[in-house]
Image (spheres, rainbow, N blue to C red):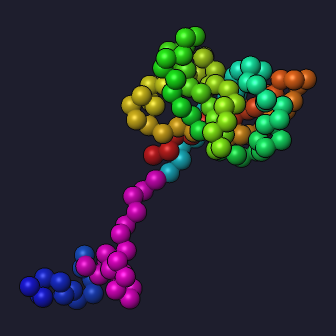
Amino acid sequence: MGELIKDGGGGLVSLLHGRGGKLMVPKPFARDVFLFDTYVAGTGYVAGIEELEPHLNIDDKLDFFREPNNPHDAKAIVIKNVDGAKIGYVPKADNVIFSRLMDAGKLLFARISKKEMRGNWLKIDIKVFLHE
């Protein structure tokens, strides 16, 4: 049985064990694919958005969550910051394909590319990515 574990230094066992005999499991290939530029809709309806604004920074990651039971849009995608605070939605005009991707199990997220307070309305431009 010992012959099965021995390796001359160039086989699968040496690949998995790497240098010094430590087990090195290959990590799956993953990347973030840029899909689209858009904005966060509905920020004017989010209670406390003025207090949240200073904590939203350029390049911050924003998480997408499907909201299929939304009474206004069955394809709604809510956008939250990394702390879980709701900041708005993907615009209805942009969410048809994104909702289909998410319903198929794909992970979508955004990064803030620009933000600007316009009175009591916060305009947030985002870049949407697919994590694969």
Specify the segment rendered in magenta: 13-30
**In the picture shown, does residue 6 fall above or below 41?**
below
Farthest residue, direction right: 119
The quadrant of the picture occupied by the N terminus is: bottom left
What is the total number of numbered labels drawn onto the structure image?
Answer: 0
Q: Where is residue 61 in the image (x, y as percent from the top left)?
A: 65, 44
For residue 52: magenta? no
**In the picture shown, does residue 93 fall above or below 12?**
above
Farthest residue, direction front: 47
Q: Position of residue 45 (x, y in %)?
A: 74, 19
Q: Position of residue 57 (x, y in %)?
A: 77, 45
Left or right of 18, for residue 80: right
Q: Position of residue 47 (x, y in %)?
A: 76, 25
Q: For the point 42% across and 28% down, which residue is it?
A: 103
Q: For the point 73% across and 24% down, which residue is it?
A: 46
Left or right of 64, for residue 88: right
Q: For the point 40% across and 63% down, which residue is it?
A: 27
**In the picture shown, does residue 118 fall above or below 70?**
below
Can residue 64 be seen here? The reply is yes
**In the picture shown, does residue 82 fall above or below 39?**
below
Can residue 35 be seen here? The reply is no
Left or right of 31, for residue 10: left
- Residue 14 figure quarter: bottom left
Left or right of 120, for residue 97: left
For residue 18: magenta? yes
Q: For the point 37% across and 82% down, which residue is it?
A: 22
